[in-house]
Image (cartoon, grey):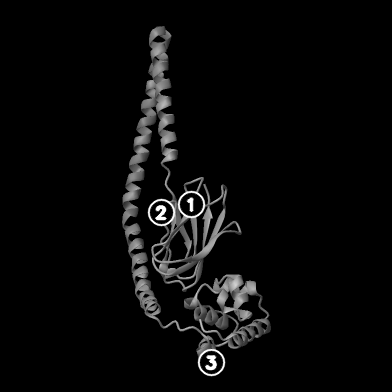
Amino acid sequence: MQNNNGKQVEIGKSLHEARVAKGMSIDDIQKITKIQKHYLEAIEQGNFAELPGDFYVRAFIKQFADTVGVNGIELLNEHDDSLPDTQSEEYADEVSKDDVNSRVASRSREQRKDSFRKVIPTIGIIVAILVVVCGIWAVVVHTNSSSQTSISSSSVSVTGSSESSSSSSKADDKKKEDKKSTDTKTTIKEVSATKYNVTGQKENTVTLKATGRAWSSIMADNKTLFQGSQNSGDKKDVKLPADTKSVNISLGNTQGAKILVNGTELKYDKSTPLTTQITLEFSK
């Protein structure tokens, strides 16, 4: 990053004045741009060294400017010499991938919807079969129960055998229920483009995998658990506190990051802005 504090202070001052004129707070800007509050404050103070890297300086400044009614492109062009050069090979690759990945993500969503619509009739048939089977099973159980009661009245030894068989059956049912509860898998349901509901586990772990240069942070119930930069191939596991209800994940490069919850990948929409915030709501 070029050392030109005077120009940086001038940029920060102009954005600060525009924000105040708009009657907006730093928190308002954070909610709209999804950029962390301390980075927005660093921009206003002209302290660009606090930003996660040269790659994000122009992107953050443009988003800030557009939000407060300043033409971001004109502001960048006016101070082009005092800002870091992001027209690197990495930057070009990210921009080109953004368009391609947006189209791929859109097609993927449509394909998933079509697949779901096709399996609805099959699901209906399976449910009907299960209802019939459960009905037959209930009749059989009732019949067996009546038979065991009749046998117990005429033979003590047979009654003892029936009770033993019934106890064994209950024990087997309990084992099956216990095994079912331990085999419960994590389910992630999309509520909106940036909000998901997660169910299935009492204890949860969020994993961040970097497929490119990326910055991210994780907050559980408004408490920061992790924030920092990652290079391609880096992996960060964050175990959430017990009874965590809500997790906010801020991404500085949506194209260069993957999110997994208990090993299950979250298929978020990568056509969202370069910097975005994803919310996970947990329920048992």
* Mark 2 vs 1: CB contact within 8 A: no
Say which quarter of the image contains residue 61: bottom right
Q: Which residue is mark 1?
A: 205
Q: Which residue is mark 3?
A: 78
Rendered position, 271 above or below 174: below
Q: Which one is earlier in the sequence, the residue at label 3 or at label 1?
A: 3
134 or 27: nearer the viewer: 27
Say which quarter of the image contains residue 67: bottom right
Residue drawn at point x = 53 percent, y = 88 percent: 82
Residue 104 image point, x, y percent: 34, 70
Q: Which one is earlier in the sequence, the residue at label 2 or at label 1?
A: 1
Residue drawn at point x = 55 percent, y = 72 percent: 35
- Per the model, the C-alpha gap separating discs 2 and 1 is 10 Å
- 10 Å crowding of disc 1: few (<14), some (14-19), many (20+): some
Three-letter amino acid code of the residue under disc 1: Thr
Q: Which residue is mark 2?
A: 264
Residue 280 image point, x, y percent: 51, 58
Q: Residue furthest front?
A: 3
- Describe residue 95's horizontal placement relative to residue 42 as left or right: left
Rendered position, 261 above or below 5: above
Whether residue 94 is visible here, answered yes or no, is yes
* Mark 2 vs 3: CB contact within 8 A: no
Rendered position, 275 above or below 17: above
Whether residue 249 is visible here, answered yes or no, is no
246 or 80: nearer the viewer: 80
- Per the model, the C-alpha gap separating discs 2 and 3 is 46 Å
- Describe residue 268's horizontal placement relative to residue 50 as left or right: left
- Describe residue 64's horizontal placement relative to residue 88 as left or right: right
Three-letter amino acid code of the residue under disc 2: Thr
Residue 100 image point, x, y percent: 34, 74
Residue drawn at point x = 49 percent, y = 78 percent: 54
Q: Which one is earlier in the sequence, the residue at label 2 or at label 3?
A: 3
